[in-house]
Amino acid sequence: MDYKEINTFEKALEVKGETLDQFNERTKGMDIDTVGYEKVKAIVFALNGGKHVNRGYFPWFYNPNGSSSSFSYFGFHYDIAYAAVSARHLLVDSERAEFAGETFPLEYSQYINGTND
């Protein structure tokens, strides 16, 4: 399956061999950020075609909730701040990283911010 066809979380789970019901049962009772972490793991696994990479790309996306400097930090200016978030779940190329950031912002927000916003 071409990675661009993996445009929903359910499709990412399908690649992993898990249904949404199975995922929900497995993650029942977990904190929201932990559920987000599990979602990100499934998404990256699917987009990478089942490969784990040690060197790669992390997704780029706008984080409207910001990020604490203890989690990620790049730099700041008097009127704008920048944050670079690193991830253990890297994508094999920049195209997939961009696709992940554009396609799955809610899942990444759940993981990073601990919120469903």
Image (cartoon, helix red, strand yellow):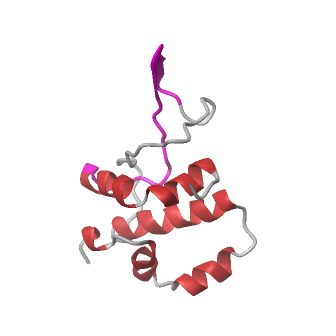
Residue 73 percent across, percent down from the top left? 52, 29
Is 87 included in the stretch rendered in magenta?
yes
Q: Which residues are magenta?
A: 73-94
Residue 12 percent across, percent down from the top left? 42, 74
Q: Residue at x 45, y 72 (%)?
A: 9
Q: Residue at x 53, y 52 (%)?
A: 109
Q: Relative to 57, does residue 67 appear above or below in the rendering?
A: above
Relative to the observer, which residue lies in front, 63 or 74? 63
Q: Residue at x 34, y 55 (%)?
A: 102
Q: Is residue 51 left or right of residue 19?
A: left
Predominant secondary structure, magenta span: loop
Q: Relative to 77, does residue 9 appear above or below in the rendering?
A: below
Quadrant where the N terminus is found in the figure: bottom left
Q: Residue at x 48, y 69 (%)?
A: 42
Relative to the observer, which residue lies in front, 111 or 45? 111
Q: Quadrant of residue 92?
A: bottom left
Q: Quadrant of residue 79?
A: top left
Q: Relative to 72, does residue 95 appear above or below in the rendering?
A: below
Residue 27 percent across, percent down from the top left? 67, 74
Q: Quadrant of residue 91?
A: bottom left
Q: Residue furthest right?
A: 29
Q: Residue furthest top?
A: 78
Q: How many marks?
A: 0
Is 58 included in the stretch rendered in magenta?
no
Residue 62 percent across, percent down from the top left? 42, 43
Q: Is residue 23 left or right of residue 49?
A: right
